[in-house]
Image (cartoon, rainbow, N blue to C red):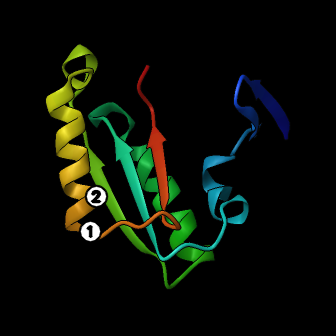
Amino acid sequence: MTDLVLDFGLHPVLLSSGALARTGTYAPHTRQAFIVHQDASKPYAQAVAESLQTTHKETQIHLVRVPDGEKAKDLSEIQKLYERALEFRLERTDAVFAVGGG
């Protein structure tokens, strides 16, 4: 684990072989997990979901797909993510994971 230093503070970053399968051991307990992924990264998003479900059995998991490539970099896509978050009644204490992308 190392800290990523940004203008607004330190953020822990984990770079490790097999880290996706251990996401649940690093993630705090949360009521819900909102996992955003692209088609190409779906297997990785599912690995995160499985790890969270194994470690935090009571956590409700939501896998949310966004378009691949430049199509995802659009305000209408952000609006769709907000709408899904509202649909799931996501709160500040819930977790959001972004898997894949660029």
Question: Is 23 or 82 nearer to us in this picture?
Answer: 82
User: Which quadrant is home to the C terminus?
Assistant: top left
For label 2, the SS is helix
The foreground one among 90 and 44 is 90
Q: Dot 2 surroundings within 10 Å: few (below 14), some, or many (20 or more)?
A: some
| Mark 2: amino acid | Ala
Residue at image coords 68%, 57%: 22
Disc 1 + disc 2, Cβ < 8 Å: yes
**Residue at horizontal 31 percent and vertical 35 percent from the top:** 38
Q: Quadrant of the N terminus?
A: top right
Disc 1, SS: loop
Q: Give the residue at x 52% y 55%.
A: 48
Instruction: Locate residue 65, reporting x and y percent.
Output: 25, 44
The residue at the point 64 percent across, 56 percent down is 23
Percent across and percent down for residue 76 are 14, 31
Determine whether, in the image, residue 64 is placed left or right of residue 50.
left
Q: Is residue 1 left or right of residue 101?
A: right
Of all residues, the one furthest to the right in this rendering is 2
Q: Crowding at label 1, few (<14), some or many (≥20) Cα neighbours within 10 Å?
A: some
Q: Position of residue 92 (x, y in %)?
A: 48, 63
Q: Amino acid at mark 1?
A: Phe
* Residue that numbered label 2 is attached to: 85
Residue of label 1: 88
- In the image, is 9 to the left or to the right of 100? right
